[in-house]
Image: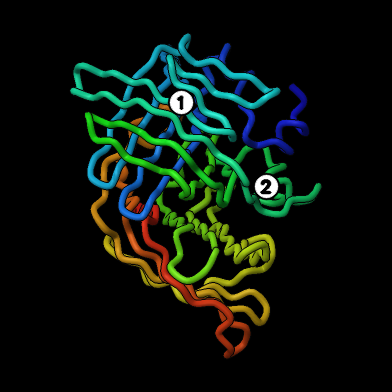
């Protein structure tokens, strides 16, 4: 598959050439679904390391998380239309179908959620996804893409006889691929704001770049259909970075715009993250945190609201 074509469509499986090599690699999609009280996220993916290739699905709820192993032969994909299949489970931008039974973990999850009216970030030839020009650099350890800042969701998931209804609610989709997650990073995401139809995503990470490291920033605030993007490649400055294992208070500046993000970490659950293709790094993610976002132009507040049901990871070395 043509590399430029894949770059323009980051939702597609990027690692086809890696399936028949021993080169370390991972690729994972992140499907987050929330209602007023509950959330559940599914992370289907693959990891490749020398002499070991696996597929997996990670599941995270407000209170629990699970890692379900699959044989790499259970991983199927299609480009047109985009679809990922692992075992009996299907994932696409139109929805997900879940059928998981893991006796060892006493886990049973099944259900279906349909997606519609997806809103995504603006892209062009220079900035084919949220990584902008960095998308064209072949040696990045981790690539990131936003697939849907916000989409309508309808359906339900039953997990261990607990039925969660998602009718008339909101979802979010992103993905990562490469060989390793950054050693230190923060990530937060929310699209259940109290007063406004808005969606938000932020990641700040320690990025290895050949002979040196740099702090990479990707951030999008979408208010209705208006997009405010704060990134390393559009000269965003990090002017406040107060982060510990339980909270963050961050301010970004781009031109005359100031964006402040505050959040407190609420009940994290364990996930596995890749290091050189192996899912060996233990991280903790919350999908029930609050995020307060304030956008100013000079000294005038043009947006200030709080989102519930937020995803939050704080990973520090």
Q: Is 8 or 103 nearer to us in this picture? A: 103
Question: Which residue is at a point 46% across and 49% down the rendered structure image?
Answer: 169
The vertical placement of 219 against 163, above or below, is below
Question: Which residue is at a point 29% across and 18% down the rendered structure image?
Answer: 101
Q: Is 72 or 181 nearer to us in this picture? A: 72
In the rendered structure, the answer to whether residue 78 lies left or right of residue 270 reads right
Question: Which residue is at a point 45% across and 65% down the rendered structure image?
Answer: 193
Q: Residue furthest toward the right?
A: 125
Identify residue for label 2.
129
The crowding category of the residue bearing disc 1, from other C-alpha atoms within 10 Å (few below 14, some 14 to 19, many at least 20), is: some
Where is the N terminus found, in terms of image quarters? Answer: top right
Q: Disc 2 or disc 1, which is closer to the eye?
A: 1
Going from the N terminus, do you reach mark 2 or mark 1 first?
A: 1
The vertical placement of 295 against 83, above or below, is below
Q: Which mark is residue 193?
A: none
Cα separation between marks 2 and 1: 26 Å
Label 2: state its secondary structure.
loop
Percent from the top left, x then y, of residue 130?
A: 64, 51
The crowding category of the residue bearing disc 2, from other C-alpha atoms within 10 Å (few below 14, some 14 to 19, many at least 20), is: many
Residue 141 showing in the rendered view:
no
Q: Is 77 or 247 nearer to us in this picture? A: 77
The quadrant holding residue 252 is bottom right
Q: Is 309 or 20 nearer to us in this picture? A: 309
Residue 50 showing in the rendered view:
yes
């Amino acid at each position: 598959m043509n590399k430029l074509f894949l770059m323009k469509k980051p939702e597609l499986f990027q690692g086809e050439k890696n399936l028949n090599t021993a080169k370390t690699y991972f690729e994972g999609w992140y499907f987050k679904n929330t209602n007023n009280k509950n959330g559940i996220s599914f992370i289907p993916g693959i990891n490749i390391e020398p002499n070991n290739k696996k597929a997996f699905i990670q599941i995270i709820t407000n209170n629990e998380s699970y890692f379900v192993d699959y044989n790499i032969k259970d991983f199927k994909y299609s480009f047109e239309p985009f679809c990922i299949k692992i075992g009996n489970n299907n994932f696409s931008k139109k929805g997900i179908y879940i059928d998981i039974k893991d006796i060892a973990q006493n886990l049973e999850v099944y259900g279906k959620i349909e997606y519609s009216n997806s809103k995504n970030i603006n892209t062009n030839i220079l900035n084919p996804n949220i990584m902008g020009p960095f998308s064209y650099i072949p040696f990045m350890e981790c690539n990131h893409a936003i697939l849907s800042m916000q989409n309508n969701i309808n359906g339900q998931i039953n997990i261990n006889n607990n039925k969660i209804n998602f009718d008339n609610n909101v979802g979010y989709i992103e993905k990562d691929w490469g060989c390793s997650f950054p050693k230190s990073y923060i990530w937060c995401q929310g699209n259940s704001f109290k007063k406004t139809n808005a969606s938000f995503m932020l990641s700040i990470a320690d990025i290895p770049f050949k002979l040196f490291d740099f702090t990479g920033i990707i951030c999008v605030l979408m208010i209705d259909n208006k997009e405010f993007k704060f990134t390393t490649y559009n000269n965003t400055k990090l002017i406040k970075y107060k982060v510990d294992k339980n909270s963050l208070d961050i301010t970004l500046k781009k031109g005359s715009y100031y964006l402040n993000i505050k959040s407190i970490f609420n009940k994290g659950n364990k996930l596995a993250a890749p290091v050189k293709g192996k899912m060996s790094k233990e991280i903790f993610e919350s999908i029930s945190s609050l995020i307060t976002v304030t956008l100013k132009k000079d000294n005038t507040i043009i947006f200030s609201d709080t989102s519930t049901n937020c995803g939050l990871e704080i990973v520090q070395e």
